[in-house]
Amino acid sequence: MSNITAKMVADLRAATGLGMMECKKALVEAEGNFEKAEEILRIKSGAKAGKLAGRTAAEGVLAYAIEGNAGALVEVNCETDFVAKDAGFVEFANFVAKTAVAKKPATVEELSELVEEERKAIIAKLGENMSVRRFQVIETGNSLTAYIHGALATEGVLVEFKGAEDVARKVGMHIVAAKPQCVAESEVDAELVEKERHIYTQQAIESGKPAEIAAKMVEGRIKKFLAEITLNGQAFVMNPDQTVAQFLKENGAEVISFVRYKVGDGIEKKEVDYAAEVAAAAKV
């Protein structure tokens, strides 16, 4: 039997969009012949999955599941917003979230393997490439809630909190709208703060301000910067006259952590000229 390398398995998975274990088994069966292995997979799983694997899946939905002291937020991608609205695709995304909570996989690859059969089935039905892009599980002794924004379910948050759930849910809505980077100032990366301090210091020096005044200007700008990127420091969207920290305190609640996703963040979407595609097809 030919030696099957990890790269061979990865390349076959990239070409077919199928699971790693399936790709490895096919390569073993094909004695290392890539084309034969791809053919085996096409026969066993249906041609659609293989043909669609190269397409960019940059649309999709977010889904969450909360079971007891564990919760998960997942992003599942597809190619078009039309399929993203399909009830079957949404059902698959919810299944992925529930699987993440139940099995608590360590990586996206592990979670993808757990839902591979269901993924292939929905691909065969809807005719688009789909993938589990990312997920995060929170296990905690505190409470959990989630908020998914709008009918398209493209922005959402999973919140770990203490206190009343309706209060935490309102803060979850704020998180989606205001996009804080973390909960508190203590969580902000020190290098980021120093970088901002350096920029503000140079700006103050170049403005010709006296050193004492310049130092106060810098500290004021750092304070404003931290308030803008931390949840506790931001003005609460439902009442801008108070900060989120003040809103939480007056309601006897506290946000411990959160996970915020927006579908497609960081994915370069391929621009498709459908008119050109139709014209090209007409010439065949």
Image (cartoon, rainbow, N blue to C red):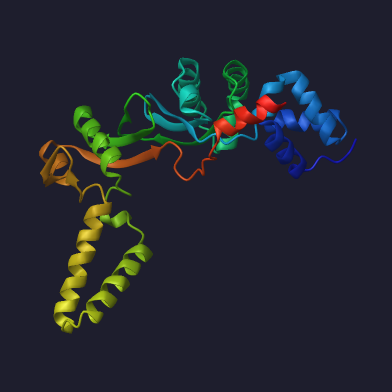
| Residue drawn where x is 24% and y is 81% of the image | 205
| Residue drawn where x is 23% and y is 28% of the image | 165
The one nearer the camera, 283 or 52, is 283
Give the left or right position of residue 194, taking residue 42 as reference: left
Q: Is residue 197 above or below residue 255?
A: below
Location of the N terminus (image quadrant): top right
- Residue 127 location (% of width, % of height): 60, 21
Q: Is residue 119 above or below residue 138?
A: above
- Residue 162 location (% of width, % of height): 24, 35
Quadrant position of residue 284: top right
Give the left or right position of residue 183, taking residue 217 as reference: right
- Residue 210 location (% of width, % of height): 15, 84
Q: Is residue 98 visible?
A: no
| Residue drawn where x is 50% and y is 25% of the image | 96
Give the left or right position of residue 88, taking residue 128 as reference: left
The one nearer the camera, 228 or 270, is 270
Report the residue that reaches farthest toward the right. 1
- Residue 48 location (% of width, % of height): 67, 22
Give the left or right position of residue 36, taking residue 237 as reference: right
| Residue drawn where x is 71% and y is 20% of the image | 45
